[in-house]
Each structure stands twice: as C-alpha cells, then as structure tokens.
Amino acid sequence: MILNRAQLVTHARDTIREGSKSFAAASSLFGRTTRERVWLLYAWCRRCDDLADAQDMGGTLGDQSGAQDRLAEIRDLTARAFAGEPTGDPCFDAFGLVAHECGITPAMAEDVIAGFALDADGWRPQSEGDMMRYCFHVAGAVGVMMAVVMGVPARRDDVLDRACDLGLAFQLANIARDIAEDAEAGRCYLPAEWLAEKDIPESEIMAPRHRAALAELAARLVVLSKEHEQASRIGAAQLGFRERWAILSAAGIYGAIATEVGRRGEAAWDERVHTSGRAKLGFVAKGFAAALLPPPKIDTLPKWNRRQLAAMARAEG
C-alpha cells in the first residue's frame, strides 16, 4: 500500500517516539513543517540502522551473517526512494519525500550508508582519525542532512560544518557510553592505538583490571565530544529561533550523557547512562535561554572537521 504524506509523517512520528526519546523531545520544539521533515529523515536513519544491524529500534543486535546483503538492500531502497519509486517500506518512502522537499542529495545519503558498510566489513578503527571518520559517517553526515532539512543552503559550508560537529559530539558520547554493550556485540569503536597505549587487549576490554585505564580513554572521548558540541553552538546561532532552541536543547541532553560517563569513571558501565524525562525538560528550558544569547566564543575549532573527514573517507573508499 502506498502511503500519502500525512500517513508517512504519522509513521515517522511514531518511529522517533519509539526509537529516540531524547531526539523526539528536542524535535517537538521545531515549527510544524521542519518537525515533520526531521521525523521523516529520522525514520530513514533508524530503519537503515536496524536493517544494517539486524535489530529492532536499536535493540539487541541480531544475527550478523548476511550483512553485505542487508547493505545492498539499504542502497537499493535508498536509490529507489531518490527516484521517487514506491519502496514498500514507509521509512524509505519517507526519505524519498523529504529528500525531494529539501534537496538532500544521493551523495549525502551515501556518506551515511558508508558507515554501515564499515560495520558490515567488520572494520575496526586503528587511529583517532579512523574513529572520527566513522563518527562522520554515522552521525556527522546525518547532522549535515538535518541542517539541510532545517533550511540551511548547501552552499553554507560554515553552518554545515558546525552541524557535522554536533553529530560528531553525539556519536563520541554514544561510543563512551556504549563501550560495554559494543563489546558484548563483538564490536569496538575505540582506536586500537588508544587501547595499545593502555595495554588493553580488545578481547579483554571490559576486564575489571582494565577499568581504570578504560575510564581514562572514556574521558578522552568526553573531551572530544565537548569540543565538538561547543563548536556546534556557533552554527546553531545561524538558524531560526525555534531550530536554534531545538538544537541547543539536544546538545544539552546528549552533552549530559558524555558528562555523566566522565563523572562515573570506572563505574560508567555498571548500568547504562541515560537522561531522565525531568532532566530533558530542564535542558529544553536551558536551550531556550541559550537560544536568546550570542553563541560562545571559541579560540580554536576542533582538530577534526567535516571536509577533512570527508576527504579521508574518499581516500579510503
């Protein structure tokens, strides 16, 4: 059955409410048109992630055999969505709709899909640069598309760079929080060089004797996340008020995750770090206040940036 726009928006709204309470809370601050488009884009991102990992709404990873076939399916359905063809999957139909409305390009989508390809290949980051390139694919490139959905022209590289920074900040926080879950699933996104510095074999990453050293590595992730989060606030200042409010609220919510991981130290993985509903409301209020103020002054932008990471990806590809 082919769904109309209203039906696709409703499906996408339900998807974001189930898939990400934090992002759903922040998206409610957008104006109606932008909010709907953000939902449509999120639905595609969530569905691609679930297909790639054989999971449901970001839950436990399923059987990872056949990863290349699932990757091919993602690329095929995305191409059909860009062509305006019905895909039989409302999340991909939603993406075709929002791509048409906002000017999202196949190259932008491929930047994201390339991250799923790395996982399908059983890839591991060897260096900090490798880790940041992965973060670019799975989150920074999504930030770029989100900015386009919010009305940022493709020529505004300065704003798109900062949108990428926010995605990088989010993913770095996720990596720090999810070290134990990733290890259980047979994955590791910490650079091999970092682990070698601390004499932590990947196969023993969660061993109690390595907890102190692992906490030090998580602290490095938190510092990187905060640097990119601060840089993203410069770009947010170029958005409309409601968009700025939503972005700054999301930055606060995810920034709190990184902060809590750092604060817990060796106990960071005893239970999953999350932000309570009450805390989310607090960050929405803080985001409103921050949206009324000038952006922070930053002497030096982060070491890693969108064009640098994209160039690394093209060189590896």
Image (cartoon, rainbow, N blue to C red):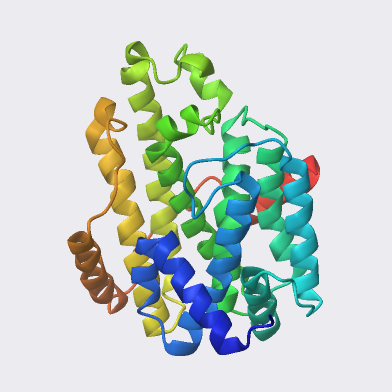
- Most extreme residue toward the front, as rendered? 1
The residue positioned 48% from the left and 48% from the top of the image is 171
Number of marks drawn: 0
Q: Where is residue 23 in the image (x, y as percent from the top left)?
A: 40, 65
Can residue 110 be seen? yes
From the viewer's perspective, is residue 121 above or below residue 115?
above
Residue 208's x, y, as percent? Answer: 32, 14
Identify the image quadrant of the N terminus: bottom right
Q: Quadrant of residue 237?
A: bottom left
Nearest the eye: 116 or 199: 116
In which quadrant is the C terminus drawn?
Answer: top right
Task: Determine the residue positioned at 55% across, 60% down.
Answer: 46
Q: Is residue 154 visible?
A: no
* Foreground residue among 84 and 247: 84
Q: Which quarter of the figure has residue 93?
A: bottom right
Q: In the image, residue 78 lies at what x, y percent?
A: 74, 65
Give me the residue at 60% from left, 69% from top.
145
Between residue 89 and residue 157, name the one nearer to us.
89
Looking at the image, residue 267 sits to the left or right of residue 222; the answer is left
Residue at the spot 74% in from the left edge and 49% down from the top edge:
71
Horizontal side of residue 259 vs 3, given as left or right: left
Q: Which corner quadrant of the image does residue 219 belong to?
A: top left
Above or below, 23 relative to 122: below
